[in-house]
Amino acid sequence: MKKLYDNVYEFTHPLIQHKITMLRDKNTGTNEFRAIVDELGMLMGYEALSDLELEDIEVETPIEKCKSPVIAGRKLAIVPILRAGLGLVSGILALVPTAKVGHIGLYRDEVTHEPHEYYCKLPSPIEERVILVTDPMIATGGSAIDAINLIKQRGGKKIKMIGIIGAPEGVKRLHEAHPDIEIYVGHMDRGLNENAYICPGLGDAGDRIFGTK
């Protein structure tokens, strides 16, 4: 993992980079695209959650009793930004099946490219959980900023953001708005075009995950 600047990281694992290249290919079909996003959720979640706090509990093995570590506290909350963020959830749940899942619904105005909220449901008590916000693309950063605003307004404190692809403009804007959160991207791309799409990017992640246009 490469630290780009304070609290902003780019994954360097070869498997992550390989799978991102497969996602970029315009010939990758819906079923394969969805499966690769799921795999990336697991790989990136594994990396991003390496600092989870542990506590020892007593267990009895077939041989003897011993102290052994488990994840401490209220465990994890996964909060996808609808709809594309859903694609990363099952991979992370495979790692932490006890995690609770919330949802934040935002849509992007086609003219201003700014996000608008239409749904927010978070696990309780959200303030006691490590919160992993998922969205495959961090483009302008607007959706991520608004989603994290909503989480903080409801008491969320320890927040991490995971995206497969990031644009420098959007990641910088997100970091400036929320310098206290950790931001993880699979790859930092060149930048945004006039339609606020990431270049070279991988197209519309939601459409490619769900097979819509």
Image: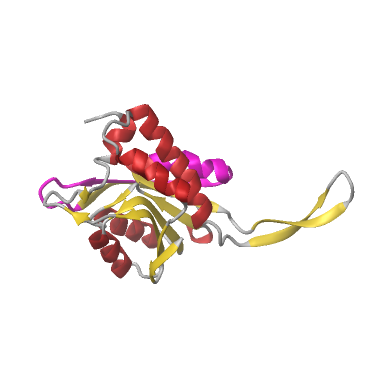
| Vertical relation: 11 (above or below) 31 | below
Q: Could you say which quadrant of the image residue 170 lies in?
A: bottom left
User: Would you say residue 83 is visible in this rendering?
Assistant: no
Q: Position of residue 87 (x, y in %)?
A: 39, 39
| Vertical relation: 1 (above or below) 194 | below
Q: In the image, what residue occupies the spot 44% across and 60% down?
A: 159
Q: In the image, what residue occupies the spot 49% across and 61% down?
A: 127
Left or right for 138, reference 76:
left
21 or 211: nearer the eye? 21
Q: Which residues are magenta?
A: 87-114
Left or right for 113, reference 137:
left
Left or right for 25, reference 15:
left
| Vertical relation: 177 (above or below) 25 | below
Q: Position of residue 202 (x, y in %)?
A: 27, 42
Q: Position of residue 122 (x, y in %)?
A: 43, 49
Q: Does the magenta segment cover residue 2?
A: no
User: Would you say residue 111 is visible in this rendering?
Assistant: yes
Q: Could you say which quadrant of the image residue 11 lies in?
A: bottom left
In the orientation shown, which residue stands out farthest toward the right?
Answer: 63
Q: Does the magenta segment cover residue 105?
A: yes
